[in-house]
Amino acid sequence: MASLPLITEPDRCLGTHDGTPKRQVITLNGVERSGWAVRLGVIIVSGALLITAVTIGIAPRLWRIANAHSEEPVPLPDFIPLSQRSYVYDAAGNEIAVYELENIQPVSFSDIPEHVIQAFVAVEDNEFWVHHGVNARSFIRALLSNFASDAPRQGASTITMQVVKNDFMAGFERNGRYKLLQLTYAVRLEKERSKEEIMERYLNTVFFGNNSYGIAAAAETYFGKFVHELTFPESAFLAGLVRAPTSYDPINRPERSRARFAQVVDRLVEDELLTEDEAIEVSETFVIPERVNQIPTRDVERTYFSETVRDLLLNGSDILGDTYEERYTALYRGGLRIYTTLDPDLQTAAETARNELPDTTEGFDAALTSIENETGAVRALVGGRGFVPKQNEVNLALAPSQTGSSIKIFILAAAIQAGAQPNDVIDGTRPCVLPNPGDNLEPEFIITDGVSGGIATLAEHTYRSINCAFARLSQIVGLDRVVDTTYRMAASDFLRPDLPESVREPLRPYASFATGANEMSTLDMAAGMQSIANEGVHHEPYFIEKVDDSEGRRLYTHQSDPERVLESGAALTTIDTMKATLSTGTARRELAEFAQLIPAAGKTGTQQNNYAAWFVGASTHLSTAVMVRDPDRYTSMVNIPEFVEAGVPLVRGGTFPARIWGTYMQSAHSGVTVTDWPAPPTLRGPAERLYLPGTECPSIIVGFETPTTTTTTPDAPEEVLDSEPIEPVPILEEVLTGTTIAPGVIDPYAEMPSVPADAYVVPCE
């Protein structure tokens, strides 16, 4: 017995070509002949153990040894809940996404066909139904073989022992006590659980390679089938992978996989589960899987929408837990059922409409967000041509970008809320020089581009999109009030004034706000438009309706918390004012016909240098924002060959964005009864002139003076000069009838400076 300790020393191994350790070969002529003496001793001892096992049973013996210190059974914990993939569904109940780390799809024993179970029992543990957790004969046979032969080690693990190893012994040190504990726990497990429970656990947890855990995942991965669809040969093939799923991987090592399957077929013949003829037929016809599959009915891919939902659950809410770790575990292992707002028909319509934008070498792309007015539910979201992991992951629908003139929807709404009327007049003459509060480096804000509007009504300046008029209007209303109104109208988890600057650049009350210098996303703009289209009541945009756990218990249900951000009359007047954008304004070429069919309102926008172009609009049903830009942000959309070929040499908001918006909204309203908004309130009184104190000075006429004339001597006596009538020049006196809204004032009803529309307003000296 003195030589027995040599048995426990590590064997010197040589690596095989597949990385599997191989026992060093020692021949009779080698210097290690003494090893045979050791083996002989092992055989003798093992033979004695075999006699003992046959006589009294090895498993109970080991059980008593393991518990000799207390004579108490070793308690087994419950099975750890299986990791389960979480599913995401659209508003119609269609599966649209799956979140998982390992591909695990638990299946109950009753749902596993008998021939599948037969195949695994035959290949892995053909005495499973009769042993008590440990197969003593197999254990001794493997022990004798492993020490008496240089061949690769034989295994003696039963299915029960494999369950024990996977469930209860993770992290245990692989020393001499490990196998004893495994045997002990296997016997105990058989006493506490039925064979069916053990088999179910085994088939749900065993690893098959290619990130597939359990029979259901393996059936999908290798054959694109559900478990109940597996044939007997397919089941046997999967059973053959369990011993070494990496070595027998059919995708990466097809020859080894075929050889292993041949061994499995031979085993099935030995166990009389296949006849010789059937075995030949199976060997000749069975096709080794060549690629990873998905079940045909589960045609789901990562999308911009599903990625947004994932990000919201992990980082944007505490629905799934207080810590990131809790949320991550629940989402990827908890078997959740997540029901979303996505309308499959509207999403298809949105993706089709996006294709109105021609493909270009520069990679210009379009984004779209569409929100249901009555609820705030995001019904469609397109972040670009398509989500491609590690290649095209930027979600343009949520990417803030300069908005151009589309930001004017907020300025207009704030002005009307503060008392302005569509027939009020304002100066839109270009160029214009205005104060630039908040910017110490540039005390003046100068606009030289765009269309000159002169003195005209607010309604006309809106449908013509006059920059100088709205830059002036934003300061008349008060920049802080405009920014506050914008935040309230477009509020969401993505846009709040208290978000850290590292998360979201804040909206700033600068003069450049009116020209779209602040950045907004299509979600922000659609949310703001929803507030107007819903008659002043804002519903924060949301993506998730409800979340259930794996047992069907409700974890979360969306609760609407609407907020009135505009008076109904102000919202209706704003909508009515923006209708002309489609019929006679900057979007008329693309949307005039649409406006005759469906009541709608909107606003175009074009960023400086044509880096981005927008259309934001609504019906009574949906509010939708579309943006077109280069994902790299700063490529001018002027004379792009593919766009020129499509008849658009200069991309503005009234071109591709309006076209995409119209195509989508036309499809979205197919078969839907669409009504118009109620008529706006009647005008409160005569039109007034809106002016900016300190820049524009209202005046009254206090008298007239005749210009001084000069006498002109004709060049020739016969020349007679026509005399022109001399008009008296009015003498003006400045009248201080108002002051600029003080910085920080956000009262939506604070009065704006105005005078009668026919008053004299001149530049201040």
Image (spheres, helix red, strand yellow):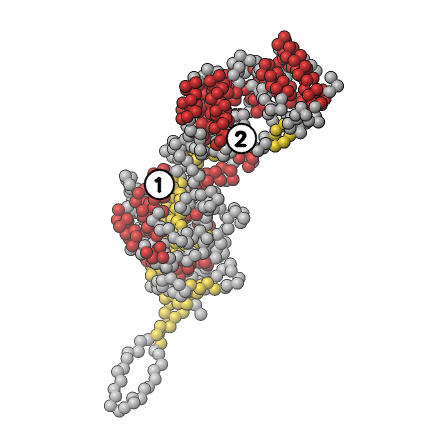
Quadrant in the rendering for residue 234: top left
Helix, strand or loop at disc 2? loop
The residue at which mark 1 appears reads as 348
Q: Is residue 210 left or right of residue 522?
A: right
* Label 1, label 2: how far apart the Cα atoms are: 43 Å
What residue is pinned by disc 2?
A: 247
Residue 603 in sight here: no
Q: Is residue 272 left or right of residue 160?
A: left
Residue type at tag 1: Thr
Q: Earlier in the sequence, mark 1 or mark 2?
A: 2
Which structural element holds mark 1?
A: helix
Query: Is 706 left or right of 25, judged from the image as shown?
Result: left
Name the residue at 40% across, 34% down: 299
Compared with 249, 469 (above or below) is below
What residue is at 51 percent from the left and 60 percent from the top?
Answer: 439
The quadrant in which the C terminus is found is: bottom left
* Vertical placement of residue 697 versus 423, above or below: below
User: Is any part of residue 700 visible from this angle?
Assistant: yes
Q: Quadrant of the N terminus?
A: top right
Relative to 291, say whether 597 is above or below: below
Image spot of residue 118 (x, y percent): 47, 18
The extreme bottom residue here reads 717
Q: How far across and down, in percent of the image, does residue 5 sit?
A: 72, 22
Task: State the mark number for residue 329.
Answer: none
Between 400 and 447, which is closer to the camera in this rendering?
A: 400
Which residue reaches farthest front?
A: 29
Instruction: Residue type at mark 2: give it.
Output: Ser
Q: Residue furthest top?
A: 55
Could you tell me residue 407's position as x and y percent? 41, 53
Cβ atoms under marks 1 and 2 closer than 8 Å: no
**Pair 1/2: label in front:** 2
Residue drawn at (63%, 18%) of the image = 144
